[in-house]
Amino acid sequence: MPEQESERESGKVTERNSGAGGAHVSDRAMPQLDALYREVVLDHYKRPRGRKKIEHPNLCTSGFNPTCGDQVMLSLEVESDRISGLEVQCQGCSISVASSSMMAELLAGKSKEEAQRLFDTFRCMMHGQDPDPEVDLGDLEALSGVAQFPVRIKCALLAWTTMAEALRKLDAPGLKEGPHTDDV
């Protein structure tokens, strides 16, 4: 039987039906949780993390979303397979900026494999799939509602896809030593 969720706002009730076999509908129907998620996203948008300049990055790269104009520039410092420094400069909508800020917080000190697992789990959530329950997405949970708006999914994933591509490039032959600049 399909799951339904209702939201009560200003006396108006709206229902969304996930359908049989559809994406799991979360507890986000609670107005308090929605308000908390909005606060988390706005906090990351107004006070983005990861803005501290990385002095000796292994790789500098950028990503662009032509649909809405969001841009992200990343500087990565990786030592012994761990992300020891990550600078994120993002210009765009609140979802894009907040997601890049959350990424900067989550990836500090993570291995490249852990970073990839976080990305894969977040991407699943953005596409309406149940995320791996063993992966702590932290503040990224606040972006779970973006999955309902397909045009905004790219905004949420821009910094993450740029980071994943940068990590793949770091593993490419010839990019092991010294700083490199590349456009993704």
Image (cartoon, rainbow, N blue to C red):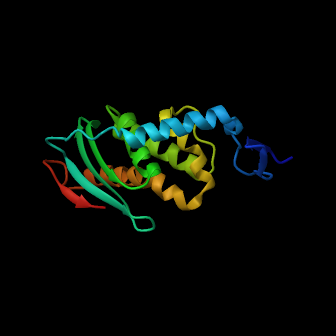
- Which residue occupies 48% across, 58% down? 154
Q: Nearer the viewer, residue 136 or 98?
A: 98
Question: Could one spot residue 103 in this view of the protein?
Answer: no
Image quadrant for the C terminus? bottom left
- Which residue occupies 63% across, 48% down? 129
Q: Nearer the viewer, residue 170 or 59?
A: 59
Examine the rendered structure and indicate whether residue 14 appears above or below residue 54.
below
- Name the residue furthest bottom: 66
Question: Could one spot residue 125 in this view of the protein?
Answer: yes
- Name the residue furthest front: 10
Tally the numbered discs: 0
- Which residue occupies 73% across, 43% down? 10
Q: Where is residue 132 drawn, in percent x and y? A: 57, 38
Q: Where is residue 142 drawn, in percent x and y? A: 54, 39
- The reply, left or right, for residue 153 in relation to residue 17 is left
Q: Where is residue 7 drawn, in percent x and y? A: 74, 43
Q: Where is residue 87 drawn, in percent x and y? A: 26, 43
Q: Nearer the viewer, residue 110 or 50?
A: 50
